[in-house]
Amino acid sequence: MIMDTERVQDLLDEIEQLSRHLSEREQEIEKMKMSNLFLETLFDGIDEEIAVIDQDFTIHDVSKVFLERYGLEKEAVLGRKCHEVAYQSDEPCRFGKQMCPLEKAKETKERVEVTHFHEQEGGEVKELARVIYPLFEAGTDRQYFVEISRDVTEYRNLIRKLKGSEKKFKAILDTATSAILSIDEAHRIILFNNAAKRIFGYSGEEVMGKDLSMLIPPQYGDHYEYVKRFMDAKTPKIMDKPCLSRDSEKMVRNSP
């Protein structure tokens, strides 16, 4: 009878331990579900093409942006080779003299980034940036890679336009006969063109980063009030008193 009671108690203890273990596992599973949900939201929320590929170029997962670009459903992509989907090629991608970034990532086991041009249907040329991140599964030789692709065509074109505009703007500043200067919110001078150098008698090194008051002596008015009035009304107005050049200012200060 004693043996039976001890056996029953042992079984009860085992059941209790099993219940605790199951409860802990359920909590872990819930945490994993939340983590996976977060990763899935992040995965599909990024505005770049993302693909998870193994060492044999087989696609294991892709983002919505990837599917939208190629006009495919996920079922039509998973299990296929990345070069088959992206370039309808039976061989790994070649970008001129550059080797496939996945091949390079397999070789170096490090992050790889390449930029290349790809001609779309219709003759439009796209500039693409591809980044490969290697992933390693613990306890196995299996390798996985995250490939992130970004169309940088529009970005590059915008940069070129901005550089062109910047050159034109600089040419206008340098050839203008009127003094042109700009200040920041703290009234520090951040732009001072060639005409301003001639008119005020200061070099760019002497005025850049300095307060605007160095060009407007106190006896000729408070420029802070003019700037504040402009910021409030957004209407330009000529200051009542003329500014002085360095030489004129010296004459005024030395006059009796």
Image (cartoon, rainbow, N blue to C red):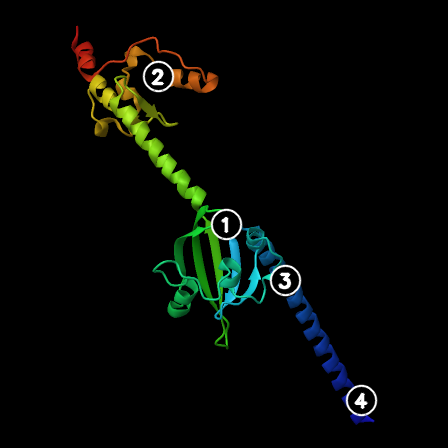
The count of marks equals 4
- Disc 4, SS: helix
Where is mark 2, residue-wise? 223
Q: Which mark is residue 5?
A: 4
In front: 5, or 165? 165
- Image position, residue 18 (x, y; %): 71, 78
Q: Which mark is residue 143?
A: none
User: As shown in the figure, which amino acid type bears the numbered disc 1?
Assistant: Glu
Distance of mark 3 from mark 1, alpha carbons? 24 Å
- Disc 1, SS: loop
Mark sitting earlier along the chain (2/1): 1
Distance of mark 2 from mark 3, alpha carbons? 68 Å
- Disc 2, SS: helix
Relative height, residue 163 to residue 153 (above, below) = above
Q: Is residue 106 left or right of residue 65?
A: left
Relative height, residue 68 to residue 232 (above, below) = below
User: As shown in the figure, which amino acid type bears the numbered disc 2?
Assistant: His
In front: 188, or 161? 161
Where is mark 3, residue-wise? 75
Foreground disc of the pair 4, 1: 1
Mark sitting earlier along the chain (4/3): 4
Mark sitting earlier along the chain (4/2): 4
Where is mark 1, residue-wise? 121
Residue displayed at 20% across by 17% down: 246
Q: Residues within 10 Å of mark 3 (few under 14, many from 20)?
A: few
- Single out the residue that lies furthest toward the right: 1
Distance of mark 4 from mark 2, alpha carbons? 97 Å
Foreground disc of the pair 2, 1: 1
Q: Residues within 10 Å of mark 4 (few under 14, many from 20)?
A: few
Residue displayed at 45% across by 42% down: 154
- Single out the residue that lies furthest toward the top: 256
